[in-house]
Image (cartoon, helix red, strand yellow):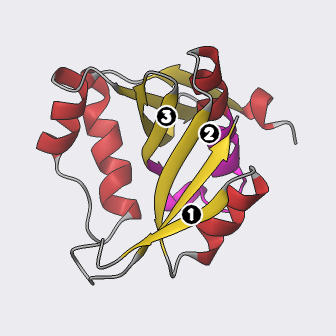
Amino acid sequence: MNLEEVLLFREATVADLKSIMRIENAAFTVPWTEAAFRNEFIINQYAYYLLATYKEEVVGYAGVWLVLDEGHITNIAIHPDYQGNHYGEALFRKMIQVAKDRGVVRMTLEVRVSNNIAQGLYKKLGFQDGAIRKNYYPDTKEDALVMWVDL
């Protein structure tokens, strides 16, 4: 299946908050707040959010901070009802392309050290292990693995 024919991608706006929060709350045990996302859209001049839609339904989103020639992935999520279909990979590849088109030459992200599925995807896309951020996640004090890729 060619995911480019199945999924459509578009830039998210503050008007998409309801859809983003639906996915955020379903995908994460400690979700970002609506206020945090609202700040991303209204205040953070570096934030860019991309939506993935399937049959006109928003099924995923990804966020990145674009600062000069670097991009930092802030979050990526696919609604649990749509996970396992490679939608996350397709969304991530599209986000990388958007970043490259905007002059980004290196991307970074943090991932839970226990999240082997996500780490596998990131490595498949060329990301390498960087450093460990101790006690990064407030809910469990779990460490974060910092990963990076040169584009």
Tell me, yes or no, if residue 54 can be seen here. no
Front residue of 140 and 51: 140
Residue beneath the point at 35% across and 65% down? 28
Which residue is more in the foreground, 120 or 106?
106
Residue 80 in magenta stretch: yes
Residue 76 rendering spot, x and y as whole percentages: 48, 49
State yes or no: discs 2 and 3 in contact (Cβ < 8 Å). Answer: no
Q: Which mark is first along the chain, 2 or 1?
A: 2
Q: Residue furthest right?
A: 1
Mark in the foreground, 1 or 2:
1
Badge 3 local density, few (<14 within 10 Å), some, or many (20+)?
A: many
Q: What is the spatial separation of the Cα atoms under label 3 and label 1, in whole angstroms? A: 15 Å
Question: At label 1, which amino acid type do we have?
Answer: Gly
Disc 2: CA contacts within 10 A as few (<14), some (14-19) or many (>=20): many
The C terminus: image quadrant: top right
Q: In the image, 79: left or right of 120?
A: left
Looking at this view, name the residue that lies furthest to the left: 35
Q: Which residue is mark 2?
A: 91
The disc labelled 3 sits on which kind of residue? Gly
**Which type of secondary structure does the marked residue at label 2 adopt?**
helix
CA–CA distance between discs 1 and 2? Answer: 23 Å
User: Which residue in the structure is indicated by mark 3?
Assistant: 71
Q: Residue at x 26, y 60 (%)?
A: 31
Q: Is residue 110 left or right of residue 134?
A: right
Q: Secondary structure at mark 3?
A: strand
Part of the protein shown in magenta: 75-93
Q: Residue at x 55, y 34 (%)?
A: 52
x%, y% of residue 119?
63, 67
CA neighbours of label 1 inside 10 A, class few (<14), some (14 to 19), many (20+): some
Place of residue 45 in the rendered image (x, y in percent of width and height, measured from the top left) = 26, 20
Q: Secondary structure at mark 1?
A: strand
Q: CA distance from mark 2 to mark 3?
A: 15 Å
